[in-house]
Every structure is written in structure tokens, then in C-alpha cells.
Image (cartoon, rainbow, N blue to C red):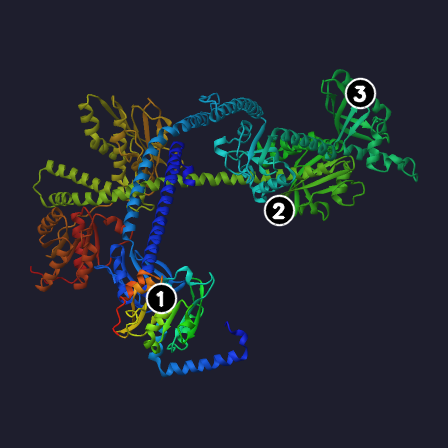
Amino acid sequence: MKWLNNLPLKRKLTLIILIACSGALFLACGVLAGYQMFDFRRTLVRDTTVLADVVGENSRAALAFDDEDSAEEILLALKAEPDVLAAALFRPDGTQLAKYFRPGAQSEIPAKPGEDGRRFADGRLQVFRPVQLNNKRVGMLFMDLDMHGMYDQLRLFAFLSVGVLLGSFLVALGLAAPLQRSVSRPILALAETARQIAEHRDYTARAAVEDRHEIGALTRAFNNMLTQIQEQNTALMESEERFRLMVNSVGDYAIFGMDKEGRVSTWNAGAEQTLGYKASEIIGNYGSTFHTEEDIAAGKLATGLATATTTGFFRDEGWRVRKGGSRIWATITLTSVRSEDGKLRGFVNVMRDITARRQAEVAVAYERDLLTTLLDNLPDSIYFKDRASRYVRLSKSKVQKGLAFCVNRHQTENPGVALPEHLTSLENFGRHLLGKSDDEFFAPEDARTVREEEETIVSTGNPILGKVERTTLLDGKNAWTMSTKMPWRDKEGHIIGTFGTSQDVTAIKETEHRLQSQLERLGLLDKITRAIGERQDLNSIFQVVIRRLEDQLPIDFGCICLYDTADNELTVAVVGTRNESLAQSIRIIERGKIEVDENGLARCLRGHLVYEPDLAGASLAFAQRLAGGGLRSVVFAPMQVESQVFGILIAGRRAAHSFSSGECEFLKQLSEHVALAAHQTRILTALQQAYDDLRQTQQAVMQQERLRALGQMASGIAHDINNAISPVALYVESMLDSEPNLSARARDYLGTIQHAIDDVAQTVARMREFYRQREPQLALTPVKLNHICRQVLELTRARWNDMAQQRGIVVKVETDLAQDPPTILGIESEIREALVNIVFNAVDAMPEGGTLTLKTGIAGDVSKARHVSVEVIDTGSGMDEDTRRRCLEPFFTTKGERGTGLGLAMVYGIVRRHNADIEIESAPGKGTTMRLVFPEAVVSSSPQTVTPVGPLATRLRILIVDDDPLLIKSLRDILEMDGHIVIAANGGQEGIEAFRNSLQRREVISVVITDLGMPYVDGRQVAAAIKANSPSTPVILLTGWGSRLIAENDIPPHVDRVLNKPPKLRQLREALAECVSQTPPTQGPT
Amino acid sequence: MKRQPAGLSIVIWCFFSLLALDGMTCRATGESREYQIKAAFLLNFAQFIQWPANAFATPDAPFVIGVLGDDPFRAALDQTVEGETVRSRKIVLRRGRTADELKDCQMIFLGKSEEAHVREILLRLGKSPVLTVSEIRGFARRGGIIDFYPEGGKVRFEINPGAAEERGLKINSQLLSLGRIVKTEKEEN
């Protein structure tokens, strides 16, 4: 019936009505049908019985007399009964007497009669009926009846019944719908009202009353209930609101509920404020969210819940964790909440953040600890006194000190008497002192002073800070104390006494005193040291030391002696001047000698400070000598450097024992200082010397480095230039040598060209010399400076005359040449070059024009070695000091892009090579004078005459190997002009092949002239190849590097002779002649 | 069982009669069978025929069957009527040699031995309500009421309803429909 409960009321009612009606009808129909069935059967049975009885009655006689025919006749009468399908009569012994079958009907007659009675089967009724005669069975009748008729009737009946049922159902349905409404409508209305109330929680709604009977009563009761609920609800809501406001307004308290498992279920504003979580964030989480990791590990939540569950509540105080991890110190009360039947419902947690209170408590405890620590541990005496100067509180150290003092005094004053009670322990004494005054410790006078001070503080409120005073104790001893006394105020600011600290500073005072004298000595030491620092010679240092010592230590006698190790004696260096008479009397004078005796002085000379406190009983000679002068105490302080004593400082006083240990120490230190200073003075001198040397060396090295760089560059340039000018030199020389018909003018021009070429070659050669430490010892020749000056003016004319005029300026040139100046030794071309450079600079320095003066003169002492000077003077812009100082440095230039910075550097190089000096006088706007000063030539030798060398008589076959076609051509021209056969090869490889070819053709090459620097195969390889083929063939190396090779003695193997480029015809001829003379004459064609 | 007080003699009689019965049955089955049927017929006739009230001396007087002449039934008739009743009256068998001996019987079976005496016997019996049955041929036509005759191995009977009517006996129609109806024929002497 459950499904019925779930149906809506309307349908339920309708259904109930239908079910009721249908059920009743069905029952009626069923009963009727059953009855009908029963009735049918009963009727059938009765009819059948009757029929059987009739038949049986009729057949009694036939049976009794066993008459088959009659029996059959009787049975045949059953034809009138259509339902009878078959019939039979049996004798009492069971045999069949007669039978009857309905035509067309299918039936069987049992062979033997069955039991009396009837049997329904297969739509048939079979009846066995005994036939009796005079109460005696005479036979048995069997009848088989068809019951289809009956069933047809039953079927009809059933059909009718169903029809009736259906009809009834429809009618019931039609009636049920309107009928149920009268019941369901008010109930549904009530339900709807209830539903709306439940939904909207609007307890003001009321259901309409429709009738006065049960539903009406229900509705009214419902409405009454609503009224009550409404009132209760209002009350509840007010109460809840009040409670909520109350709980929420308690911001200090975090109040939250937890379920049985410890999960947060409710959350108030205080909780949010205290723990930081919003209700939505935290509800459902475990209360252990607020626990620290240690508490979680210890299972504090479970413990708390268990405790609260068993005892009703759990109190705790400790750290809790807020949202974000910060911690609060909180008190927690966890109360279990139980329903009325005692069942555990959950827990209420009231938490209060008392972090601030706890911090305050901790802080107070901390302060208290600090104070206690201070009072118990500080060695200073700390006390609090009331207005009457009585002790209220004392620090432990003060009690200790006081106790020690009192016990000591007691034992001194009353020896052997037992200590009074209050002196037996620190605690007792501490108690004893409370209420006592300083009279316990101090002499009456001092105690009164103290009291007066404290009265002043109490009355004025002014503290006494850091007062150091000398107090006298009760036992008469003095002590220095430093005390600070402050007014002691209560919270209202009233002075209720004094408090302060006092410190025994006796030791400090003494130390201070010692320190003072130490400082004074230090000051003296400092002064002396400073004075020493200002002096740099030993003697004045010593004098200062002695004088200061006499004046300021002070001493009565002082002297410093230097020790001579070799003679083992002391030499007096300085003697104090204060007591000259004393010094005289003991015969100690400057430069005087003192012999070293074996005791005091000797010890001092071994490095020890020797103090003779009293000379009165001294037996030693020197001591007696000092004592003779009235000195009683003397100090010998060694002066040593690197444990080597080199002198002694002697200080003496007339009073015995007059040197304190501090003074001795001072003297020792002073002597060390003096020794150091003396040593440093010596070192400084040496250092100064070394420094000067070093600076010069450094400058030279620096210059040389620059020159080396230049030289390496120049060397390459030189090689190329030498190559380039070689043909010029060869042709010019050749023309001058072999062209007799030249005009004088042409000869003159060619001569100038030759000079110029020579100068170029020299210049180039010199360029390489910049970086050479040892320049090749060039042959110095006597040079006449006046002659060179004239040449220079000629060479530079273009510059100071033509070019200057082009720019519209006038440079006036003057010469002031000395009459027949001494000859100097030098290289003419170099000196000429230097002067040309200087003249160029002078012209450049006069952009607005001016006067250029060349001047020669004799400088220096006539008696000593004479010097010849050349001056180039301009009236140009001049140089400032810095420029003047740096102008000789390579690459230093004031001409910007136009200058190389090498001109004056080269001049300097040349000058240095000639052992000459260069002097520069200049000032901005005052012009510049450059002066070269050469030493006079000591030995004047006759000038060498150059003997011209003619062409070789022998005709030679010469192989020339070079990579420069111009050079090859010029060499070929000149050598062929001399009558030689010239074979030229361009490059090393070609040269080697040409030589081999000649060998194969048996054309002997007399000489091979090869260049050194060639691509792929250079001159060295060519020489090696030729010597390999024909060792006797001389090889002449012609190179732009030539002079360097010679100078450095770096002539490559297989080379017989090295010639410079540009080659000179004369040299060529000489070389060829030399080679030929060494080798047997060739079989060349003539 | 009625003769129970006879004691040991009866037991012995029963023993011998049983032996005799058994011996007869074995000797002459066909004859015995025929008389068993005829005995049953006799009893059945009594059932289908109504006697007038004056036929019995008292209301509770027994129904007496008399066997006149030689008894062909031997024990069969006794066995047949043993325990039976006719209209609630006890049946008593009486054997006699003369009609007079059997005058107050309600039914008299005339054995074959009486064939010659039929006229006489019937006369003797007058009009008294006695059912006469015999196996004598033509007995019914000779004024008897029922006689047996064999037909096809079966025992058949003839009924003379007029004779019955004379003696005041009413014969059931069923019985009539079973037997051959005959009338009294004049005897040719």
C-alpha cells in the first residue's frame, strides 16, 4: 500500500472510491458467479440424480430379472436428454447388462462400474448410481453427461458480469471525481498554505476555513499553531538576534563552534578578527588549523576534545596560528555541547587573544629580571635610600663589600671575638643594613658630607653625576670612589629618596696617574721623534734628543756615544749643554773616546738597557768617573739597528734611585727611536742616490723603448728607400766617374745629387740606429762646424726663403760664426742633418716671420777641455716649461698632423752619439735658442783621402739576382760599362736556375751578386744553392739591411761579402776586385 | 442363525450341509445355477407383486413361501431368502406335499412332480391370495400365475395377469413388461 501513500490526495481519493466500488462489485459478481457455478452443478447433479433414479427405477425389474432387451429399451429412453452422451447398466457382479450411446457423441463406458457418486472431468459429468430393489442393490447405472451447455451458460454469465463491472467502474469514476473534491479541496488548500509557509517562512499566512466539521477544525488548529509559531519565531529571532549581536559584539573573544570531530561549524566576528579567517574560509576545517606545528604533532586538538568530552571543558593557554602564519598567545576554553538527552553534539570554543597582555607580562618580568640581574651581578654598588639617607635596597656587591669591610674591621679591632650575628652571612648583613645609614662604613665627617649631599638632592632634585671623591673609611683607609646620585621619585614625581651607584675607582685613579706620567713621556717621545723627523743629519738629531731630555724629562746629564766595532770603543757624539761644567769635570767631551769596560757598558753594547740606581758603591772605572761628577743614578740605553748596537744613550741624575721603571722604559724606547731615525737617515741618503740612478735609467729605458719601436718601423722603410735610391746612386756615381765631358754646372748638380743621396742613405741608416744600444762605431772624421752651417743654410734655403715668401712672411737669416773654431770629431752628415732639423723647427716656430740666427762659438773653460757650440736662435713663439722639457721625446710634437715628433728625438740621438750636449733656452713668446755643445777633438788627424778605384781589368761573368728590375737594370748598365758580362735573374729561384744552366753550359760565373730580401727564395738560400753547386764561386750579398748585418756580425753563411744599398760604384769595384783576387781567374771569354 | 440354540447338532449339520453343498455344486453346476436364478426370481416376484391386506393374518405375519412337491432348489432357495424381507416381512420357507399343507402361504412353487396335480391343486387353493409359480410347462395358461420357461439358455417366464387378478394380486407393470403375457386356456380333457 505504499505506492498509494505517494499519490496525490485527489487521485488517492478517486482511486479509493474506485477500488472500493470495484471491489464490492467484483465480490458480488464473484459470489454470484460462484453461486451460479455451484447452483449449476447442484442442479445438474440433482437433475442427473433424478434422471438416474428414474432410469434406475425403471430398470430395476430389468436388472432384477437380468433382462438385457428391456434394459436397453429403458436406456434408449435417454435419447430425450441431449446432454446424456452415454449410459450403461451393470449387474451386481459388475458385468454390463445394457448400454446406450448417443448417436454422434464420443464417449466411453467403463468396463466395470466405479464407486457410487459423480465425477466431473473434461467438461463431463460421470455418474454411477446404484439401482436398489427392496433395499438391495440389484445393479449400477452409469451415465456420461456433457456439461458444455452448462459452461456456455456460465460464459454468458461471466460476460455479463464483466460488462456490469465495467459499467459500474465507469459510473463510479464519473461519480468519484466530483465527490472526492469535497474532501480533498480543503485539505489541499491547507497543504498549499503549509507549503507556502514552509517555503517563505511567512508565519502570518492563514488557511481559509471552509466548513465547521473536522477539516474546518483542522484548519483552525493549524492557524492557531501558526499563530503560536509566529510568536515563537519572532521571540526566537529576537533572542537569536540579541545573542548574535552579543556574540559578535564581543570582538575580543573568538567564539566558534566545532562538531564532534573538531571541525569548525560556526564562526563569529571576534573569531574572524582574532584568527583572520572569514567564516566561509574556515567552516568545515579542523580546529587544528589554528594550532602550531608542535601542537599538531602532539595531537593537541584530540587531547582537548577528549578532555572536553569527559570533563565538560578544556582550558588551554598558548600559541595559536592566525591566517597567514602569524602567532597569537591566546586563552582557550573548549566546552562540550550536549543535547538534552546527554548526547554529545559538538563543542564551543571561546578563544581570547592575550598576546598584548602576555607581552606586557613578559616585558615586566624581563624588566624585573634585568633589575635583579643588575643588582645581583654588577660589581658596582647600587643602593636606594629614603629621604633620611637610610638604606632601602642595596645591590649584592655593595652588601658583599660592606660585609667584607665590617668583618675585617671587627677582626682587627676585636681579635678572637666571635662575629656578631649580623656579620655571619650575606643575607643577615643585607637585612641588617636596611634602615642603616653610611655611618656603618664611613668616617663621621664623610658620612655627614654624604648625608648633606643627599639632602640637597632631595630638596632640589638635582642629581650628582660621576662625582669622583676621596673618602675616608671607618678604618682610616682612603679610597677613591666615583658615585652618581639621583633623586628617587615615586610615580607622582615626588622625591621619596635617593638612589645611585658608587664605584671604587682607587685602582683607576692610580692607573690614571701612571697613565698621566706615561702620557707625558709619550708626549715627550712624540716631540722628540717629531723633532728628529725634521732633521736629516745624525748630529743634529742627537743634539735635539739630548737637549729635550735635559729640559723635559728632565735629567741632569745626557750624552750620546757612537760605537766603533773595530776599535771596541765609544766616541762621544753629543754632550748635553745643560751642565757643561759637570761634563767637563768628568771629562766627557764631544769626539772624546770612552773605553768599554767589561760590565755596564759592555752589557749595554750587547743590547740591554742598563740602569745603575746608585753609583755610590760602584767600582767600575766609568761609573766612578760619573759618580765623580755628582751623578748617583745613570741609565745606559743601547741604540741598535737589526740587533747591532751602534751607539749608547747615557742619561744621569744626581739623586739615587731617581729613574722610575717607566722612565727606563721611555729611555729604551727613545733610544730605539733615535737608532731607527739614525738608521733611516742613512738609508734615506742611500735611497736618494739609488732613486736618482733609477730615474735616469728609467728615462733612458723609456726613450730606448720608443726608439726601438721607431727603429723597427724605420728599418723596413729604410730597406725600401735603399732599394729605391740604389739606381740613382749608381748612375750618378757612374756619370761623375766615367763622363769626362760633363759641364761644370752638370758636374756641380750631380755632386749635390750625390750629397743628397748620401744624406738620404745616411738618414735611412740612422733611422735604424735609434734603438741600438751600441751604435756601430762609425768612423768619426774631423768636422768643421762653420762649413756645415753654411751647407745647412744652403740645404734649407727652400724652406726659410722660398716657402716663407710664398706665404708672404719674411724670415731674416743671420750668421754669427766664430773665427776658426776648433775642429770636432764627428759624422758630418749626421751633424748636418741635426742642424737642418733644428732650422726647420725654428722656421716653423716663426709663422709670422722673424730672425733666424746661426751662431758658432767656443764654450767652456779655456784651461780645461774646450767645447765648440752651435746655436740656432729664433724669435718665434717659444716653448713653455712643459714643452721644453718634453720636446726631445720621440713622437712628442706641437705641430699636430704636420709633425712626426721624431725630428728633435733624432737630433738628441745624434747629439748623444757625438758625446755632445743639447741645451734649450726658451720661454713662451721669447723665442728659442737651441745650443749644441761638442767637445773639441783631442787628436787632430790628417783627413783621409779617398782614392778613386778604377774599373777592374779582368772581365768577369757576373750573375745578378734581384727582385727589383730597376736595380737590375742600373747594375747591369754600370757593370757592363766596366766591361763585365752580366746575367740578370729576377728572383731567387730564377737566379739558382740561371747559375745551374751556366754550369751545364760550362760558362763559369765569376761572381754572384744577390739581393737578401726576396719573395719565396731569399738571398741566403740563393747563396747556399750556389755554394752547394760551386763552392769556389764568390757570392756578394747586396742588401738594404747591409750595414746592420755587418754591425751585428751576422753575415749569413755562404756569403763572401756584404754590400749596402745603395751600392757605391767604388765599393762594388772593390768588392769585385777582392773576390777575384781570392779566386783563381776564370776561364771566361775575353 | 435362528437355530442357534440347537447347539452342537446344528454345527454338525452345518458341517455336513456344507460338505453336501460342495459336493452338489461340483457334480451338477448347470442345474444348480438354474435353480439359483429361479430362487432369485421367486424372491424378485414377491417384490413386484402386491398382496391384499387379507393375505396376512397379522400385520407382522411373515411372508411364507411354500415348495410343493419335490424340491428342486435344495439349499439354493434357503440361501437366497436368508435375511431377505418382503415388504418388511420375514420370509419363511415351507415345504409340503399337499396344497392344504401350504394353504396359508403367500407364494407356492409347484415342483415338476406336481404337473399332474395342477388342476387339483389350483382348485384346492380356490381364490386365496396366493402367487403360484411353477416350472411346469404351460402352468400360467393352465390357471397358474407365473411359470418358467427356458429360452436361449436363459430363464424366462410367462405371466397370467388374469389369474393374478382373480386371486387379488396386483402385478407391477415392470414385471409384466418382462414376462410373456398369457391367458387361461380351456383345458382339453
Amino acid type indicated by mark 3 = Arg
Circles 2 and 1 in contact, beta carbons < 8 Å = no
Q: Is residue A413 visible?
A: yes
**Alpha-carbon span between mark 2 and mark 3:** 68 Å
Residue receiving disc 2: A643
Circle 1 crowding by C-alpha within 10 Å: few under 14, some 14–19, many from 20:
many
Residue A633: give x, y in percent of width and height.
Answer: 76, 38
**Residue A440 relative to residue A734: left or right:** right
Write down the chain letter for disc 1.
B
Circle 3 crowding by C-alpha within 10 Å: few under 14, some 14–19, many from 20:
some
Residue receiving disc 3: A387
Amino acid type indicated by mark 2 = Ser
Marks 1 and 3: which is nearer the front?
1
- Sequence-earlier tag: 2 or 3: 3
**Residue A110 relative to residue A395: left or right:** left
Circle 2 crowding by C-alpha within 10 Å: few under 14, some 14–19, many from 20:
few
Marks 2 and 1: which is nearer the front?
1
Residue receiving disc 1: B45
**Residue at the spot 18% in from the left edge and 23% down from the top edge:** A805
**Alpha-carbon span between mark 2 and mark 1:** 195 Å
Residue A291: give x, y in percent of width and height.
Answer: 56, 38
Write down the chain letter for disc 2.
A
Amino acid type indicated by mark 1 = Phe
